[in-house]
Amino acid sequence: MTACRAIPEAAARLACYDKAAAELAAADASGEIVVLDRQKVESVKREAFGFNLPKLDLFGGKGGDAPASLDRIEGVAKQAWQNGAGGWTIVLEDGAKWDQVGRDPVRRAPKAGSKISIRRASMGSFFLNVDGQTAIRARRID
């Protein structure tokens, strides 16, 4: 489509745009291309937060307009229970499931409705805060 802009004659330029638009619509209909807006990209990044995914410049942009990396999410616990390892398993309202890594104590037990904050830590790990308490290490399991 961008090449069409360089055509000086109006009828030829319009024909070029029409042909390019038809090709774009056909590629979209066949699934050959996918168009995402920034809001959808951010939604998918949030859903994938905590998983180790391959580095595909799938959600990047051109030049300086690449969306910022997601380093923290906020959510609300839908369920929480002590798991067999003695730590906590917390399921957020969006379905993300996190397990406590290690046995750091949690003063007030997490429960449905607890405010959860999760942030990236070093070497691929994550810190999870329950209702503003001291962070515990956690990993995403689902």
Image: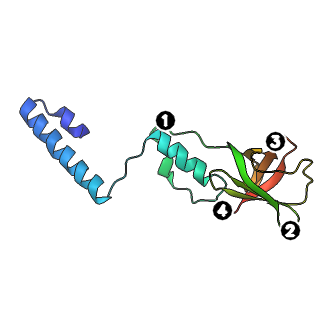
| N-terminal label among 4 and 2 | 2
| N-terminal label among 1 and 3 | 1
Spatial separation of the CA atoms under disc 1 and disc 2: 43 Å
Residue 65 image label: 1
Spatial separation of the CA atoms under disc 4 and disc 2: 17 Å
Q: Residues within 10 Å of mark 4 (few under 14, many from 20)?
A: few
| N-terminal label among 3 and 2 | 2
* Residue type, label 4: Asp
Circles 4, 2 touching at the beta carbon (< 8 Å): no
Q: Position of 33 compared to 103: left or right?
A: left
**Image coordinates for residue 108, horizontal then vertical, percent:** 89, 47
Q: Residue at x 90, y 51 (%)?
A: 106
SS under mark 1: loop
Circles 1, 2 touching at the beta carbon (< 8 Å): no
Q: Residue at x 82, y 50 (%)?
A: 110
The residue identified by callout 3 is 131
| N-terminal label among 4 and 1 | 1
* Residue type, label 1: Asp
The residue identified by callout 2 is 85
Q: Nearer the viewer, mark 3 or mark 2?
A: 3
| N-terminal label among 1 and 2 | 1
SS under mark 4: loop
In this view, which residue lies farthest toward the front?
112
Spatial separation of the CA atoms under disc 1 and disc 3: 34 Å
Spatial separation of the CA atoms under disc 3 and disc 2: 22 Å
The residue identified by callout 4 is 142
